[in-house]
Amino acid sequence: MQRFKASLKTSIEAWLDASCVCCQQQLAIAQHGICSRCRREIKRFAYCGSCGTELAFDTLHCGKCLTDPPPWQRLVTISHFQPPLSDLIHTFKFHRQFQLDRTLARLLLLAVKQAQRAHDLPLPEVLLPVPLHPLRQWQRGYNQATLLARWLSHWLQIPCDDRLLQRIRYTRAQRALSGKQRRNNLKKAFAINPKISEIHYRSVAIIDDVITTGATMAELCRLLQKCGITQIQVWCLCRT
Ligand SMILES: [Zn+2]
Ligand SMILES: [Zn+2]
């Protein structure tokens, strides 16, 4: 039995054996997905705690936000969309490497902790992953935002609600569209789950991987505000 256990352990270890997603170097702990050298390449930058614009130093509102505030109150992000972070995200989303969820969620957790120090970020009552259309989720096999939100929920002890927001219309991939096309593409794409009659949340954080124009977030903020949710944060891996 002892020998069986030992051989089972070795085979599991062999199965878990993995290399860094960025430089292919052998990893001591496969779960990490990225080696410490590449990890250090993901550098934080100072930004506006409201809109996420890069600044010389951390502040809660930049000049742009004072005249034209975003539809959310707070934004948290890890770094710029550039290697190795962009490679990690791409592999996570499009190559079925869903085990990278822990690596990316960990980086986002550190960004949240940083924002607590740099922007005095209050923690929300609940985490809301951006929903995928059921067909897209079926094609991909998972919703990347939900995987990230579940880890953060576990570490921060904040509930994750993946039922409140729904994607009700199958939309074309946003990547290839212009800003105006994206807004049109998103019309009536989302809804609040009609099965939920009462919403008790006042402060929420919407979790997404990459924010490009912010059109998806703006649409979700509009829906949440209609339900009386006044404090909306956006937590994303990066903004492009
Ligand atoms: Zn590496
Ligand atoms: Zn700003």
Image: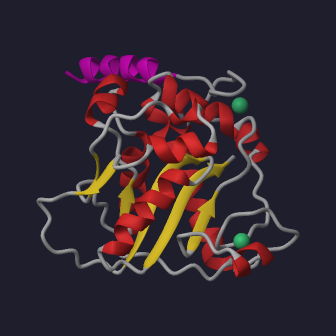
Q: Residue at x 35, y 65 (%)?
A: 223
Q: Residue at x 68, y 74 (%)?
A: 68
Q: Residue at x 51, y 81 (%)?
A: 122
Image coordinates for residue 187, horizontal then vertical, percent: 40, 48
Q: Quadrant of the N terminus?
A: top left
Residue 225 sits above or below residue 178 on the image: below
- Quarter where residue 228 is shown: bottom left
Residue 38 sits above or below residue 190 on the image: above
Whether residue 210 appears in this view of the structure is yes
Q: 192 or 48, which lies in front?
A: 192
Q: Is residue 231 left or right of residue 169?
A: right
Q: Is residue 4 magenta?
A: yes
Q: 85 or 61, which lies in front?
A: 61
Q: Is residue 183 left or right of residue 67?
A: left
Q: Is residue 170 magenta?
A: no
Q: Is residue 166 left or right of residue 17?
A: left
Instruction: Please state the extent of the stretch shown in magenta in the rendering.
Output: 1-17
- Which secondary structure is most common in the magenta stretch? helix
